Structure formats: structure tokens, C-alpha cells
Amino acid sequence: MSAPTAFNRRILVVDDNQAIHQDFRKILCTAPASSALDAMEAALFGGPTTTPADPGFEVDSAYQGEEGIAKVKTAVAEGRPYALAFVDIRMPPGLDGVETVRRLWKEDEDLQVVLCSAYSDYSWEEMTQRLGLSQRLLILRKPFDNIEVRQLAHALSEKWDLLRKSHRRMEDLRREVEEWTRELALANERLRKEMEDKARLELRLVQAQRLESLGRLTAGLAHEINNPLSVIMASVGFLRSELDEQLAGRHPLDAGEMREVCSDALLGADRILRIVNDFRIFSKLDGHPQVRVDLNEVLDHAQSAASFNLGRAQVVRELQDAPAVQGSEPGLEQLFMSLLNNAGYATQSVPEPKVHISARERDDGWVWVEVKDNGTGIAPEHLGRIFDPFFTTKPPGTGTGLGLSICHGIVAGLGGTIEVESTPGQGATFRVKLPRSTESAAAPSSSSMS
Ligand SMILES: Nc1ncnc2c1ncn2[C@@H]1O[C@H](COP(=O)(O)OP(=O)(O)OP(=O)(O)O)[C@@H](O)[C@H]1O
Ligand SMILES: [Mg+2]
């Protein structure tokens, strides 16, 4: 026999017959010295025939169903529930055993019950109809066999204990799950906040980048306009003094010289006009809504706008399944037009000028668009300056040097980047990283820049 366990030994006997209570006490309260039960267990399963001290059970009595229910209620309230109740099936004048059991389980659903009956008061079907099918119910026929009663008490109180343990385990698990769920919710909330912070920081970074490129632009602007303006003022000043001389009759006008001076002034004015025009592009692009932009469409427009500079160059597009990007249509058109203009200009003197445009989606949600040419390439000492406003290697009066700085501003405004790789004599590759569009294809696109 197993060692005595510390499981609940509280038993309630509910029976209207006083004498029965004495019988139960005799069977359950005293520990049998070396009981027939032990002998039987030893014979069946082997092992010693002597049993370690069995403390017996604690037996309480109720003589009517109502009294039994009250006792179970109190026991539960005091935290000392019964493990088992032996309930007589017929207890006149009060509740019968089946009704008593039904109500006992309302007070304590773990209570194990043995219904005691002298003969078949109820059929099994009737009982299960009233009590439902239950693992907690056994039926014991009178007259009792002492060993059977004690065996039932042992088995059912141990069962009660196991049930309690499993309930407790379930409760622990439930609490653990609750705790994990709470922690998960907290982690989720932290993550959400961090993502919000990140988005805020990114927005500030984009704004800072835009401000920075605008700052660089305006810093160069004063200087760039100052030169042609000085030329214009000097030329016009000279013209006026020459006219004064002529009017005063001091010396005649030299028409050839006058024409040259006027040309200088016009060149200066033309330069200022170009700069102002480029700046107008910038201000026009600013504030355009960011929408889903189809790369093929935007490249069609950019390519036809740059067709003069592209000249003989063969343009190959390899966009495969490149997804739509998020940006302003006029901005992206301007961006690719500038890159294609530059590529066209750089390939002017190449025997077989080629421009290759490719796009692919990256796992990180960015779309890389590359514009590659086989032109002159960029000298290493220029690589770090080509995005600076007004940096140009074109002959004076040909370019403002604002093209790539405008490109940089447009891409920065979208949170993307623009990079260049070049080997002199072998061409240049501009790589633009643009955000993939999150809008669905059905969303309407914006109108193009007027
Ligand atoms: N594809 C390219 N191949 C070689 N050099 C390039 C290329 N793209 C740009 N560059 C170099 O970068 C410089 C700056 O380019 P950017 O477009 O800003 O101005 P620009 O083309 O000189 O003048 P603008 O664009 O006003 O006509 C160019 O002058 C050139 O030296
Ligand atoms: Mg350019």
C-alpha cells in the first residue's frame, strides 16, 4: 500500500438514519491495524502486508438534505471543503438524495458523491436525467461492505485531491497566460510607441534634409546671381557713359563695341533667367501630394522631355515587375528628366551611346531605380561635388549646375536617397532609392505638372 498521503480526509455523511452514522465512523475514522483491505491489496499487487499508519478520515454528519447542503456551504466558505459525501437516497421528510446531490454540487462542484440506496429507488437513467452524467457520482448498495466503503473513501478522496491539483494547475496556467498576455500587450504598446517615435524622427530627418538642400541652394544662389548681375550692371553702365559721351559730342559711338557689350549683358541676363527658372521648378514641386506613381508612365514623360539631350542614345528600360512608387508625379518626372539629360549630355561624344534604366524592389520596402550610361564618367575629384548647387563642368552659359541638387532635394523630400558610381571613361550609374507605394492600384493618380 502506498504511503499515507496528505490529501483531504473530510467526509460528510448525509443520512436520516442515526445508526448509519455510527457505522460510517467505525469504518472510516479508525485506522485498521492491518486490514483485510491491505491483505487483499498485497495479494493482488504484491508488496508488504503491513500498512504504514493510516490516519483515517474525519467524518461529519448531517441528518437531512438541507442540513448537508448548509454544511457543505460553510465548509467551502471556511476553505475546508469536503472531499466526499455519502448521501442516502431516501431521507423523509426532507429532500431526497438525488435532489440533495444536485444542490450540493451547486455549492461545491468538486465534491465527490456516493449515493447509498437499499434498493433501486431510481433507475440509473432517471438519476442521470436529473443530475446529468457525472464522473463525481457512484452508487453504493446497502447493506454496505466495510472494505468497499473504505476503499471508496480512499479512491474518491484521492480523486478529489487530483482534481483539485489539476484545477490549481489550470488556474496557474491561466494566470501565467494572463501574465504573458499582459506582457505581450505591454511589449506591443512599447513597439507601437517606438514605431511612432521612429516615424516622427524620420519625418524630422526628411524635413531637415529638405531644409539642408534648400539652405545649400540659397547659399549658392546669391553668389551665382551676383556674377551675371555685375556683368549686366557694368555693361549697362558702360553703355550709358558711352551714350553720354556721344550726346555731349565728345566722341562717336562704336557700334561693334556696343553690340559686344549688349551681348555680355544678355548672357548675364540669360544666366539669371535660367537660375530663376530652375528655382521655379523647385517651388512648383514643393507641396505636391504624394501619390502612387507608375514608373513606366513617369519615365515615358521624362524620356520625351529629355529627348533633345538624349539625341542618338539608345535607351533601354528593364523595369520587370517593379512596383509603383510613392511620390509626386511632377517631382519624379523632373528627377528622371534631369538624370536622362545628364546621361544624354555625357554620351554625346560616344560612338554608341547607351542609357540603361532598371528598377527592382528590395525586401525592405524600397524600390531601387538605376540610370546607367556609357558616357564620359565623372572624375573622382568631382564625385563629391556633383550634388552641390551650381556645380557644373559644362562650359559657361550652358548649365546652371542645379540639375542634380534639385534631384537630391526631390528624393530627400520622399525620404529616399540618391547615389552615384562612376569610372571615368566608362560612364556613370545613378541609383535612386524610392519608397514603394502603399496605395492600391485602383487609387486615382494625381495630374501632371502644368
Ligand atoms: N551622367 C553623367 N555623366 C557624367 N557626368 C555627370 C553625369 N551627371 C552629372 N554629371 C556631372 O555632374 C555635374 C552636375 O550635374 P547637374 O545636373 O547638377 O548640372 P549640369 O548638368 O552641369 O547643369 P544643368 O543640369 O543645369 O544643365 C555635371 O556638370 C557633370 O559634371
Ligand atoms: Mg544636369
Image (cartoon, grey):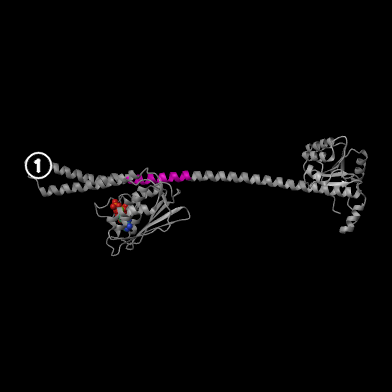
Whole-percent x, y for residue 17 in the image: 91, 39
Q: Report the magenta residues as a range.
A: 199-217
Residue type beneath disc 1: Glu
Whole-percent x, y for residue 259 in the image: 14, 48
Q: Is residue 442 magenta?
A: no
The foreground one among 125 and 327 is 125
**Residue on which disc 1 sits:** 245
Whole-percent x, y for residue 1 in the image: 86, 54
Who's the residue at 15% across and 49% down the image?
260
**Res 409 seen here:** no
**Res 275 seen here:** yes
Left or right? Give the position of 2 relative to 447.
right
Say which element carries label 1.
helix
Outermost residue toward the left?
A: 249
Mark 1 surroundings within 10 Å by alpha-carbon count, few (fewer than 14), some (14 through 19), many (20 or more): some
Q: Which of the 4 image quarters holds residue 42?
A: bottom right
Quarter holding the C terminus? top left
Query: Label 1 CB, ligand 1: below 8 Å?
Result: no
Whole-percent x, y for residue 281 in the image: 31, 46
Q: Which of the 4 image quarters holds residue 239?
A: top left
Who's the residue at 12% across and 49% down the image?
257
Who's the residue at 45% across and 49% down the image?
440
The kind of secondary structure the magenta stretch mainly shows is helix
